[in-house]
Amino acid sequence: MRVSAGEFKGKKLIPIKGKSIRPVSNKIKAAIFNILGSYIKGKKILDLFAGTGAFGIEAISSGAEFCVFMDNSKYSLSIINKNINLCLLQDKTEIIKKDIIKSYTLINYSEYPFDIIFLDPPYKANAMVSTIEKISKTVLENSKVIIVAEHSIKTKLPKIITPFILYDARRYGNTAVSFFSSGINKPYFT
């Protein structure tokens, strides 16, 4: 697994080992960042169910300002920490251990005003809609937040999870990537 673009292009990241882990493929990650393009520059990122931290590290490599990585697994958090250290990103990152599925809320948006949230829960957990609903409880009115959600093509997402509206969905084999935006404005990158 490597960083595909930006400042750390080609940097090899430490993978997670085990059959229960489904890391994002380089092809899908590259496609997502191709879609986001220059929109990522200067943004604050939240990487939920962060796994190896590949999404957040790719975002910083592509010009994002800061990333918070959130996961429940001690093993994943140790891999994220190692990957952050490999790329010398300690001053642009924060790691939070939290059970995203069991928590009532995720994060205080006024303390962490994210622009883009990467969301890649375990497919078997069926946690996509409930996690977006948790995010919606914390997003401030009139704030512009993009959610990039990776999920199984079998997962059917509603077009609206207030205040988020589904604006784009792409399919890559058995994986789908859905783009939600808060507010009434369509994000310019779609």
Image (cartoon, rainbow, N blue to C red):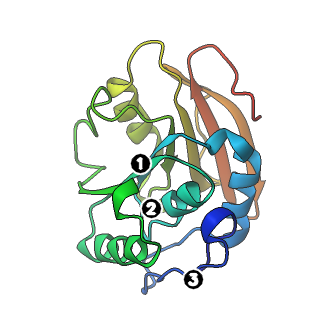
Tell me the number on the disc at residue 122.
2
What distance separates the C-alpha of mark 3 from that of mark 2? 23 Å
Q: Quadrant of the N terminus?
A: bottom right
**Sequence-earlier tag: 1 or 2:** 2
Is residue 160 positioned above or below 2 on the image?
Answer: above
Which amino acid lies under the numbered mark 3 shown in the image of this protein? Lys
Q: Are marks 3 and 2 in contact (CB under 8 Å)?
A: no
Say which residue label 1 marks. Answer: 127
Say which residue label 3 marks. Answer: 12
Residues 179 and 8: in front is 8
Q: Name the secondary structure under disc 3.
A: loop
Give the foreground label among 3 and 1.
Answer: 3
Q: Is residue 64 left or right of residue 121?
A: right
Residues 175 and 140: in front is 140
Q: Quadrant of the C terminus?
A: top right
Give the foreground label among 3 and 2.
Answer: 3
What distance separates the C-alpha of mark 3 from that of mark 1? 30 Å
